[in-house]
Image (cartoon, grey):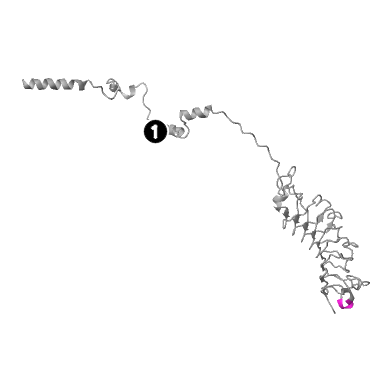
């Protein structure tokens, strides 16, 4: 009797447990497993190359739905176009009609590409130039040494109102237009050393430094009273020019006069001093070079009485 009771109690307790549903709600159709792979209506594609291509296109390009909605719903904001600014030259002036690197040269290149422009200074040294290149309007210092320039034209420096120094050392210049320099309102230093110049042009009164040494001025190359109105002139170098006289009158501001290696044979007692005024003293003129000339300075002792120093030259 006891065994039957135990069996009955076991069935009573296991009955509710059998009624508990399975956790996996998936429905498994046993008939599905009887089909062959080729008989499926949509067989699986296991082509690895296609899957890798699909992954490469999807990675980094697909956005979540929420992000896509936020991008699509955000209004497009049009940024205003920036106004095209006017190009400027190397010196800050407008480049209209001339390019951002300055006006065009005869070689078809902008001046500041052919030469070197630093601030308002233009360096064209040793470029085998045959003419003065067009310069930016604000050029202050211009150097064109060791080139092949033969002529200075009337308008080579026209409208360059800020130009203070011109250095054309060691070219082949033999001709300078009469008006090439005198219209420059701020020109202070003019260096034409080591050329073939036979005639000086008219010079502006603003000059403080002139170097025309090693040219071919000779007897007639310097006009009469060429330096008279240069009231700011301090340094005048005319060495190696085959001069036969000292160009007079010389401005009172002059501090240095170099006339060495010429053909000067005589000097007057009033060349530097005033013989009618024995109290006159010319303190500024301290550097006079007459060495290399066929002149005996001891023959005119009174010519130096007003000077702070004796000229350098032959005394016998």
**Quadrant holding the C terminus:** bottom right
Residue 132: where, in percent of width, then height? 78, 53
- Tag 1 secondary structure: helix
- The correct choice, above or below, for 81 with respect to 92 in the image is above
**Quadrant holding the N terminus:** top left
Residue at position x 33%, y 23% from top? 38
Residue 106: where, in percent of width, then height? 76, 49
> Looking at the image, which is closer to me, 23 or 247?
23
Residue at position x 44%, y 31% from top? 54
Question: Extreme left residue here?
Answer: 1
Question: Extreme bottom residue here?
Answer: 316
On the rendered structure, is 97 left or right of 281? left
Residue 300, visible in the rendered structure: no
Q: Which residues are magenta?
A: 296-301
State the image quarter where residue 55 is shown.
top left
On the rendered structure, is 147 left or right of 273? left
Residue at position x 46%, y 30% from top? 64
> Looking at the image, which is closer to me, 15 or 36?
15
Main secondary structure type of the part rendered in magenta: helix
Question: Extreme right residue here?
Answer: 276
**Which residue does the numbered mark 1 point to in the structure image?**
48
State the image quarter where residue 276 is shown.
bottom right
Residue 66, visible in the rendered structure: yes
209 part of magenta stretch: no
On the rendered structure, is 158 left or right of 124? right
Residue at position x 12%, y 20% from top? 8
């Amino acid at each position: 009797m006891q065994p039957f009771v135990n069996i009955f109690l076991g069935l009573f307790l296991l009955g509710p447990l059998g009624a508990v549903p399975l956790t996996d709600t998936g429905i498994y159709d046993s008939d599905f497993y009887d089909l062959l792979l080729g008989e499926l209506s949509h067989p699986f594609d296991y082509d690895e190359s296609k899957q890798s291509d699909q992954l490469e296109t999807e990675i980094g390009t697909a956005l979540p739905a929420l992000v896509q909605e936020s991008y699509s719903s955000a209004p497009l904001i049009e940024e205003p176009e920036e106004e095209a600014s006017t190009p400027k030259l190397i010196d800050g002036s407008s480049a209209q009609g001339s390019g951002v690197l300055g006006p065009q040269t005869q070689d078809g290149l902008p001046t500041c590409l052919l030469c070197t422009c630093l601030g308002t200074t233009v360096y064209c040294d040793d470029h085998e130039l045959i003419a003065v290149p067009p310069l930016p309007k604000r050029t202050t210092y211009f150097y064109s040494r060791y080139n092949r320039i033969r002529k200075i034209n009337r308008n080579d420096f026209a409208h360059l109102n800020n130009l203070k120094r011109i250095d054309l050392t060691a070219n082949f210049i033999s001709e300078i237009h009469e008006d090439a320099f005198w219209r420059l309102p701020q020109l202070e230093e003019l260096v034409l050393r080591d050329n073939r110049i036979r005639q000086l042009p008219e010079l502006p009164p603003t000059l403080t430094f002139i170097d025309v040494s090693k040219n071919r001025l000779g007897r007639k190359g310097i006009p009469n009273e060429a330096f008279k109105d240069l009231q700011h002139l301090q340094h005048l170098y005319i060495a190696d020019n085959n001069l036969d006289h000292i160009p007079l009158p010389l401005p009172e501001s002059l501090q240095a006069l170099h006339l060495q290696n010429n053909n000067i044979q005589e000097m007057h007692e009033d060349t530097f001093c005033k013989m009618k005024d024995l109290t006159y003293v010319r303190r500024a003129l301290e550097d006079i070079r007459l060495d290399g000339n066929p002149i005996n300075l001891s023959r005119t002792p009174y010519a130096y009485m007003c000077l702070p120093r004796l000229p350098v030259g032959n005394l016998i």
